[in-house]
Image (spheres, coloured by chain):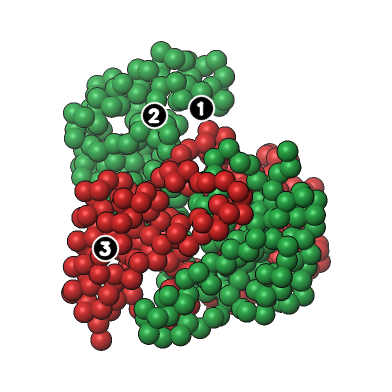
Chain colours: A red, B green
Amino acid sequence: MSQRTVFFVSDQTGVTAETMGHSLLTQFEGLSFRTVTLPFISSVARAVEAREQINAATAADGLPAIVFSTLIQEDLRDEVKASTAVFLDFFDAFLGALESALGVLSSHAAGRAHGMANAEVYAARINATNFALANDDGGHTRDYDKADVILVGVSRSGKTPTCLYMALQYGVHAANYPLTEDDLESVRLPSILATHRQKLYGLTIEPERLRQIRNERRPDSRYASAQQVAFEVRQAEALFRRMSIPFLDTTHCSVEEIGSRIVHSAGIQRRLHP
Amino acid sequence: MSQRTVFFVSDQTGVTAETMGHSLLTQFEGLSFRTVTLPFISSVARAVEAREQINAATAADGLPAIVFSTLIQEDLRDEVKASTAVFLDFFDAFLGALESALGVLSSHAAGRAHGMANAEVYAARINATNFALANDDGGHTRDYDKADVILVGVSRSGKTPTCLYMALQYGVHAANYPLTEDDLESVRLPSILATHRQKLYGLTIEPERLRQIRNERRPDSRYASAQQVAFEVRQAEALFRRMSIPFLDTTHCSVEEIGSRIVHSAGIQRRLHP
């Protein structure tokens, strides 16, 4: 069976078109698509090239391609819309309604969403990223008073990517601390964490999944043994419960979901807003 | 003048609703909005609470709130839609058109876009994040043969956040190397970089902006002096030109834009697709 091609077409990065298209396509389980992003379509010549590429995909697949477009300039949009694809137009769907609601016309200017760097936004993200890097893996604990949240959990429970995601997406200053054998055996918090108990958020994970992840890293080690991971996860969860630390099971969660759930449920103030 | 409140309402993380709303609102320059994300609205009770919060904002502002919704279940959607806000419904706008085009009905199931972790996607992101961290700041150069791209540039030109963003968004294995005084004075690549010249991508930045960024970090230092940053930027750009290394000025770019431009213009194979 032929596979259909999906295009994400944008005058900028394509991030919005990809996000929009991905959300919609995941509603069609069982179908698979070939995806192509065409970013920076910012001239008529490039729009014509994009159209030709789209038409070629329709012809090769024997099925009309699907285009998710966030093109804002009408002349570029018209060129791509004239393709043989099904054209789903993000701005066309909402801009009119929004103009009526707000009682003003929009600027119809390209490249505003991700293109223009605002110096403040830039600084907030960079500072948050630097904070996450400097306070990764318990290496540095002196800045915990400046942390918005401190993630705790066993090794490979998802702490580092979650901290980095929260930094980039929300500008949140997130530190992380891996629980040690001592912490786990005693079911006690080290004093540096006890001092900041209100900022702690636990991550846990199903032992079998953790075993797989660790085994990829250090095959057939004690670190990756079923017994060791079961012990660590059991003790970590006991510690979270004993100290009333909120915690989240990351086994079936994406990094976006973990980050969003923590920020939301812990009531963390974002430093970056949409 | 009263400020209008904008809500991003989702049964999951709210990432799609925020992205969609942000793209649209940036088309209305000069207007400012108060934004509120209501994620994980996954029961009728929570939908009713959301509606009450929205109605309270309309009443307080004296202007109808704007709701960007990615709710997929009809019963939840109906509760929120009954609010006093202008309701912009992401799925309603596109799902019908997509069902017709594909000739199948969608599953109308919540939480697919960012909620379900696919073990492969998870592994690709984690591996890419670990790669970026292990190969940050020139600290470790042995894995350059496994890199998809190696960013080069002077200190604080945006290399680290760009590598982390490319890892999380595209699963790309990105290393970065800060050009040293020696490299800059000699206008030569160190041998480890010369070996991998095809993978290099340069970042540059306007000297005045670099001076500001460095000055926040180390006020009144030689490192942050106008003379030093001008020298470094001039030499780095001369090096990029001499070695035919493609490069990008990050001064007016967001992290998304830098990452997207590099992946696109260097023809890097993404390991994560939308």
To the question of a shared chain for discs 2 and 3, the answer is no
Residue A70, image x, y percentages: 41, 56
The residue wearing badge 2 is B205
Query: Label 3 near label 1: C-beta < 8 Å?
Result: no
Residue A259, image x, y percentages: 60, 59
Q: Residues within 10 Å of mark 2 (few under 14, many from 20)?
A: many
Q: How many marks?
A: 3
Residue A50 or B269: which is nearer the viewer? Answer: A50
Mark 2: which amino acid? Ile
Residue A221 shows in the view? no
Q: Residues within 10 Å of mark 1 (few under 14, many from 20)?
A: some
Residue A140 or A103: which is nearer the viewer? Answer: A103
1 vs 3, front mark: 3
Res. A42 mark: none
Res. B213 mark: 1
Name which residue lies at 24% across and 60% down. Answer: A51
Residue A79 falls in which quadrant of the image?
A: bottom left
Mark 1: which amino acid? Ile
What element does badge 1 sit on?
Answer: helix
Name which residue lies at 80% across and 51% down. Answer: B60
Residue B109, image x, y percentages: 55, 80
**Which chain letter matches label 1?**
B
**Which chain letter matches label 2?**
B
What element does badge 2 sit on?
Answer: loop
The residue wearing badge 3 is A82
Residue B52, image x, y percentages: 79, 64
Give the mark nearer the N terminus: 2 vs 1: 2
In the image, residue B266 sits, relative to residue B170, either above or below, namely above
2 vs 3, front mark: 3
**Which chain letter matches label 3?**
A
How far is disc 1 from disc 3 in space, using C-alphas?
A: 46 Å
Query: Label 1 near label 2: C-beta < 8 Å?
Result: yes
